[in-house]
Image (spheres, rainbow, N blue to C red):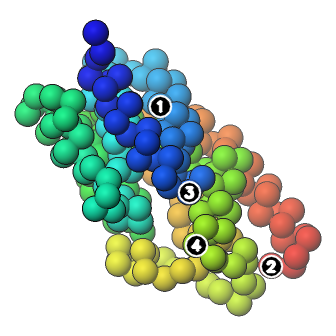
Amino acid sequence: MQTLYDKCKNSVKEVYNKFDASHDFAHIERVLKNAHEIMAKESSVNREVVLLAVLLHDIDDAKYKSDENPSVAEILQQIEANEELAKKVVSCIECVSFSGGNAKELTSIEGAIVRDADRLDAIGAIGIARTFAFGGARGRKLYDSGEQARMGMTEEEYRTKNTTSVTHFYEKMLLLKDLMVTSEGKRIAQERHEFMVGFLEQLNKEVGL
């Protein structure tokens, strides 16, 4: 008999594989791995909520949302998640997005785990790869030495201006280490952050940013 997790995984895989390489199902699998690592260090966690939220967290992302694809609410209904579980999952998802530094306040340890797990996949070597994959898919320039990183943006400002891929490091990626909530998330983020700093230093040597 299939679990809710299995049903959900089967439902979302086809949707994510329509997205570009920065947000495909491989991204979901990496976030699941991160979530498991964080949960191993935490107690009293509703694992079902965490895993379902990870599977669903990018389904309603404004960058990819389409009338052709089911929404989070529709998938939860399809897999017959009860009302209480569905509310908890949706609450976690609502706290995940960075939104230019305007993320919603966390209300549960499950939400913290999902958010940290997702943000870990936005930094380090894989974060670098994803940034350039997304930029390429959107036709963004690699870098622009005259472009200034924006701080204190509204969510709309963050989402509407197509800055270069390297500028994205300064507007988001380099900020995430200090925004981690869980102890394991913080530990993993430190190493990944240092890798990004080294990458940017080398890039500066090569192109003179």
Left or right side of 26 for 144: right
**Count of picture labels:** 4
Badges 3 and 4: C-beta atoms under 8 Å apart? Answer: no
The answer to which of marks 3 and 1 sits earlier in the sequence is 3
Distance of mark 4 from mark 1, alpha carbons?
A: 26 Å
Furthest residue in direction bottom, as rendered: 146
Find numbered disc 4 in the image and state the secondary structure of the residue it sits on: loop
**Which disc is residue 165 wearing?**
none
**Mark 4 vs 2, N-terminal side:** 4
Q: What residue type is labelled 3?
A: Asp
User: Residue lying furthest right in this view?
Assistant: 206
The residue wearing badge 2 is 209
How many angstroms separate mark 3 from mark 1 (CA)? Answer: 19 Å
Looking at the image, can residue 58 be seen? yes
Q: How far across and how far down the image is residue 75, in percent?
A: 24, 40
Judged by depth in the image, the label closer to the viewer, 4 or 2, is 4
Residue placed under numbered mark 3 in the picture: 20
Nearest to N terminus: mark 4 or mark 1: 1
Q: Which one is in front in this view, the residue at disc 3 or the one at disc 1?
A: 3
Residue 150 as seen in the image, left or right of residue 90: right
Residue found at the far top of this picture: 1
Q: Residues within 10 Å of mark 4 (few under 14, many from 20)?
A: few
